[in-house]
């Protein structure tokens, strides 16, 4: 079981953002983010978007740093990935 985080590199709203995912379950992900005071509004169907300012604290709390490619690979393998096609259908 692991919560994974990619390096902040996605620009928006005056900062850069990371993605925070679980490779096991959304329950694990929600429990981790609740314990770290990540707001529920940051959840985007299969991941949380977190600002660069939160990166170090989330890693210190146990999120495992990975590349974006590794994050997506593990998210797909977990069965939790929501595809773009699925997003458009929601």
Image: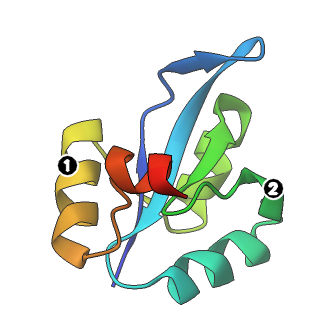
Q: Of label 1 and label 2, which has the lower sequence position?
A: 2
The mark found on residue 41 in the picture is 2
The one of 40 and 33 positioned closer to us in this rendering = 40
* Image location of residue 57, percent across then percent down: 67, 51
Instruction: Label 1: state its secondary structure.
Output: helix
Q: Indicate the quadrant where residue 24 lies.
A: bottom left
Residue 36 sits above or below residue 8 on the image: below
Residue under the image location 64 percent in, 78 percent down: 30
Q: Nearer the viewer, mark 1 or mark 2?
A: 2
Instruction: Label 2: state its secondary structure.
Output: helix
Mark 1, other Cα within 10 Å: few <14 / some 14–19 / many ≥20: some
Compared across the picture, whether 78 is left or right of 32 comes to left
Residue under the image location 59 percent in, 30 percent down: 17
Residue at the far top in the pictured view: 14
Residue 16 sits above or below residue 74 on the image: above
Q: Which residue is mark 1?
A: 70
* Image location of residue 80, percent across then percent down: 35, 73
Residue under the image location 58 percent in, 15 percent down: 11
Compared across the picture, whether 80 is left or right of 63 comes to left
């Amino acid at each position: 079981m692991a919560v994974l985080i990619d390096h902040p590199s996605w620009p928006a709203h005056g900062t850069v953002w990371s993605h925070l995912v679980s490779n096991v379950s959304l329950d694990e992900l929600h429990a981790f983010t609740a314990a770290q005071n990540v707001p529920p509004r940051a959840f985007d169907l299969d991941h949380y978007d977190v600002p660069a300012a939160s990166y170090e604290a989330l890693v210190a709390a146990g999120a495992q740093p990975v590349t974006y490619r590794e994050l997506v690979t593990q998210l797909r393998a977990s069965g939790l990935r929501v595809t773009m096609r699925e997003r458009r259908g929601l």
